[in-house]
Image (cartoon, rainbow, N blue to C red):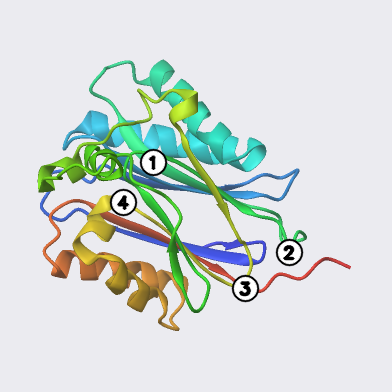
């Protein structure tokens, strides 16, 4: 559970009923800028190639994201995946959040994503879902069409297939509150009300991450469940 400038992050992950945990987490701080990238990745499929894809994209996205921003992290993840794991079945979805150095109290937190990993921000009063799922279900809803449960599990972008103009991107505040990055094994079984209740708890980040994952499995979740929680203490300018 490393201290990251003015923020503290911790993660938890459980395998549930899958044969392998194909989720991955990566955190990296750039030595020059002081920015920190947080990444959660969810490998596609219940097999070793999916797990390898998730680890590959998480590490690449964290390294590039801390240096060049969240969107650059996604592009670097794709490049690394295509080079290191050429098998077409090796794929992953992911979300990248980049926090500015603690010396920038007003700096935004950048978020980029592909697929259905999510980012939320709890500001002490309101829980905001920063990301929009890249799924068939979300695409149908946007067009006013009927949605079936299966559609929420069919992603429309991934690390291997996404085009640069398809990468999801948003920005949010980086001061007091909590940031949550999660795989769908956490947020789909729980729903936003349960996520908010757990994030509003006063426990430390590691306890919150474990509570989210445990609650998802108790709610009937069968997928791998991974949560990365970052506490965002109030930032003050240096000097």
Which residue is tagged 3? Answer: 233
Q: Position of residue 102 (x, y in %)?
A: 72, 61
Q: Position of residue 117 (x, y in %)?
A: 35, 47
Which residue is tagged 1? Answer: 94
Q: Is residue 20 left or right of residue 61?
A: left
Q: Which mark is residue 14?
A: none
Which residue is tagged 4? Answer: 183
For mark 3, does the 10 Å Cα neighbourhood hold few (<14), some (14 to 19), or many (20 or more) residues?
some
Tell me which corner region of the image, top left, top right, bottom left or bottom right, holds residue 16.
bottom left
Circle 2 sits in a helix, a strand or a loop, which is it?
Answer: loop
Mark 2 or 3: in front is 2
| Residue at screen point 24% across, 35% down | 44
Q: Earlier in the sequence, mark 4 or mark 1?
A: 1
CB-based contact (under 8 Å), mark 4 and mark 1 = no
Q: Position of residue 189 (x, y in %)?
A: 19, 61
Q: Earlier in the sequence, mark 4 or mark 3?
A: 4
Alpha carbons under labels 2 and 3: distance apart: 10 Å
């Amino acid at each position: 559970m490393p201290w990251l400038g003015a923020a503290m992050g911790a993660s938890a992950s459980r395998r549930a009923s899958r044969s392998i945990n194909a989720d991955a987490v990566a955190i990296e701080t750039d030595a020059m800028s002081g920015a920190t990238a947080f990444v959660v990745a969810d490998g596609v499929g219940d097999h070793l190639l999916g797990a390898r894809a998730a680890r590959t994209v998480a590490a690449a996205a964290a390294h590039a994201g801390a240096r060049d921003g969240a969107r650059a992290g996604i592009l670097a993840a794709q490049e690394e995946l295509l080079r290191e794991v050429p098998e077409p079945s090796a794929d992953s979805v992911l979300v990248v959040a980049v926090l500015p150095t603690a010396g920038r109290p007003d700096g935004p937190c950048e978020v980029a994503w592909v697929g259905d990993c999510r980012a939320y921000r709890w500001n002490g009063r309101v829980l905001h879902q920063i990301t929009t799922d890249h799924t068939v279900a979300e695409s149908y809803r946007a067009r006013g069409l009927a949605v079936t449960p299966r559609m929420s599990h069919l992603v429309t972008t991934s690390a291997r297939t996404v085009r640069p103009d398809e990468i999801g991107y948003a920005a949010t505040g980086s001061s007091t509150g909590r940031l949550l990055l999660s795989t769908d094994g956490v947020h789909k079984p729980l729903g936003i009300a349960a996520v908010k209740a757990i994030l509003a708890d006063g426990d430390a980040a590691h306890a919150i991450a474990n509570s989210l994952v445990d609650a998802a499995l108790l709610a009937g979740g069968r997928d791998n469940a991974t949560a990365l929680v970052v506490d965002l203490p109030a930032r003050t300018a240096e000097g």
